[in-house]
Image (cartoon, rainbow, N blue to C red):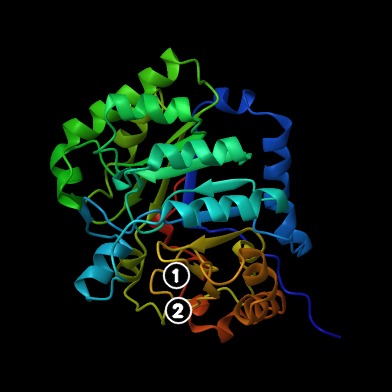
Amino acid sequence: MPRTPTQTFVNKNLHSSACSNQWLEGRDEAYKAYRRNWHEYPKNRHLSEFPLHLDIDVTNLCNLRCTMCARTILNHENALPELGYMDFGLFTSLIDQGVPLGLASIKLNFLGEPLLHPRIVDMVAYAKQAGVIDVMFNTNAMLLTPSLSEALLRAGLDSIFFSVDSVVKETLERIRVGARLETVLENIHSFLEARKRLGRAEVQVGVNMVLMEENKDELDDFLAYWRPLVDRVNWSHDHHYIFRSAGASVDECARLEEFCCAQLWQRAIVCVDGECLPCCLDAKRELSVGNAKTTPVSELWTSSPMFERLRRLHSGGDYKAVPTCRRCVFTLADIPPYMRREVE
């Protein structure tokens, strides 16, 4: 009889502090049903007709060179794919394919800064008009002018997450090369004011922090600054920092014996050129399942040999047979004790 693997879906490196639920009170039953499915599909190994969520990299260009970012590392290795903007026709095709088959959520970035796309407001508006329940993206906020904030909110944006890492000028500008703290804070505050002015209390606003050597002692100040202002503060540790602190290489760190990645039943990533990936950490495209320009996403999702192999191995407790999965930060047996943090 085949063994039953431990049901492990949690990324121990991700921490979150919920500051306000006002946004959630404004969400409808369709959103709540989508979130239930998000958790239930992996547990039940339910393979839907289409991913619940797509990460759509509308551009792989970026205006910053953050030291820990996968994009920066790829650039240093001369391994970045061809740079550009997603064609609006490809974007609308993804939405048109997905909504009738259950696509509920999209995030408009993967490697790039979404606000660089000249049609980002049109993309948000198109997705909302087509019926996508939750339209979101991460941004470094440097390009988020007051007029753009208002346009995005009027277009129907549902969630926005600001990648900030520090509220100390020297620290932020050392980590997020090319950023300016005053601009970041001014633009975020402007967005919050526009949300209030336009009566969009249901828009979720989060702030993200990646902990590393440069800012490892700043979490308390970060939380103190942002908690009164936003709905959620998220933080994690730069995985390179975890390995260095443990005195081990990525291949030497202890791993979970059995791990089954929830993403295989939740989401897919579509890169700027249409390449489709099963993992939000696969910046090197080691696990490509095909291209959305030539194959319907539903077919890639349900029938591609790579997706089928990954689901079979993970379900059977054999994720280590996939080198990319074996090296994943999600599969760490534990993070160093001093990196754990409980927040009231």
Q: x, y (%) of residue 309?
A: 65, 81
Q: Which residue is mark 2?
A: 286
183 left or right of 231 in image: left
Q: Amino acid at mark 1?
A: Asp
Q: Measuring 73% from the left and 61% from the top, which residue is drawn there? A: 49
How busy is the neighbourhood of tag 1: few (under 14 within 10 Å), some, or many (20 plus)? some
* Local SS, label 2: loop
Q: Quadrant of the N terminus?
A: bottom right
Q: Residue furthest front?
A: 89
Q: x, y (%) of residue 52?
A: 65, 53
Question: Is residue 92 placed above or below 225 in the rendered structure?
Answer: below
Q: Measuring 54% from the left and 72% from the top, which residue is drawn there? A: 294
Disc assigned to residue 282:
1
Measured Cα–Cα span from mark 2 to mark 1: 6 Å
Instruction: Report whether residue 344 is seen.
Output: no
Q: Amino acid at mark 2?
A: Glu
* Local SS, label 1: loop
Q: Pointers 2 and 1 in contact (CB under 8 A)? A: yes
Question: Is residue 8 placed above or below 258 in the rendered structure?
Answer: above
Question: Is residue 272 placed above or below 151 in the rendered structure?
Answer: below
